[in-house]
Amino acid sequence: MNSEANARRIAMVESCFGTSGQSLNEPGRVLVGEGVLTKMCRKKPKPRQFFLFNDILVYGNIVLNKKKYNKQHIIPLEEVQLSSLEDDGPFRNGWLIKTPIKSFAVYAATATEKAEWMAHINKCVTDLLRKSGKKAAEKHAAVWVPDSETQVCMHCKKTQFTLINRRHHCRKCGKVVCGPCSSKKVILTHQSNKPLRVCLTCHDEISSSQSQTGNSTPVNSSLGDPATDSHNEDMKETANDSSGEDDSDEDTDDPSIHSPPATTEEKLPWLSFSFPLCNT
């Protein structure tokens, strides 16, 4: 691809994020493609603008289509692993984007678009790993179960979620659990160097594994009384933990942006790759 044209396109992406985004202009970096995908967030599916470069995947909230985005997220592609999802009711043409720090599901408008995205991302990942000589990541963060998937704790099967009994997510398995069933914290080294909230089952499994292997990774159980501490603690973790940092319930400000249709094979208005797959 023409280097000047590539530089202009990268500069345009930077300008769309404005001061809220990081600089994307790096030597050797190429913008491969861009488009809107529906990201499964904690509370509900939401449209997000994605930009695929040859070494990173960037996405953000859509404020004004093709003009302004915010809450920029940058994922190094060498850490990425994809897994295709089976169609499930209204959720079609989806796949998982898994990394050691954060994993989530996205959905394309059509099966063709899904195939294009997955092929281009996998090609970029393969090329990066081959050039660097690095091995693919073996551990990945759990995909969070959406809040709407359950009305009761997935651990004790008893506690019903209300305004008082809030939902929490285990950072190890991704299940939705109540405060008492997620009162323990452990260090998951591939996700963070700080203790993260986990369910009691995962806590016991990690503790047992550490005892058998002699691993000295500390287990922190300092959440205190879950009835009083869970709200502030979970808000703090959501703000600091990348697994939920963009899952606010704020909708896009642009009324012309909607989630791509999931059932109709048609022209791909949401997808634009800058050059054929063989040239990436």
Image (cartoon, rainbow, N blue to C red):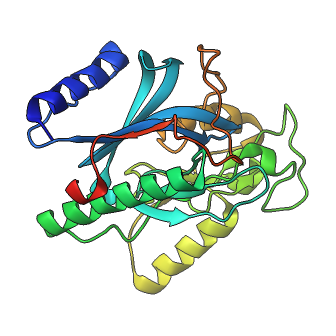
Left or right: 115 as drawn, with respect to 33: right
Give the x, y percent position of residue 56.
Answer: 29, 45
Q: Residue at x 48, y 41 (%)?
A: 241
Q: Nearer the viewer, residue 275 or 215?
A: 275
- Residue at 64% x, 49% y is 265
Q: Residue at x 58, y 56 (%)?
A: 111
Name the image quarter holding the C terminus: bottom left
Residue 274 vertical position relative to residue 253 in the rendered view, above or below:
below
- Horizontal and vertical percent position of residue 262: 68, 46
| Quadrant of image for the N terminus | top left
Asked whether residue 245 is in view, the answer is: yes
- Camera-nearest residue between 209 and 166: 166
- In this view, 6 is above or below 252: below
Residue 65 lies, in percent from the top left, at 49, 19
Q: Is residue 211 above or below residue 79?
A: below
Q: Looking at this view, is 109 or 104 the one in front?
A: 109
Give the residue at the far front of this rendering: 267
In this rendering, does residue 187 appear at all?
no
Write the residue at 68% across / 54% down.
92
The quarter holding residue 4 reads: top left
**Location of residue 86 in the rendering, given as x and y in whole percent from the top left corner:** 66, 65
Q: Is residue 11 left or right of residue 114?
A: left
Instruction: Give the vertical position of 277 relative to 252 (above or below).
Output: below
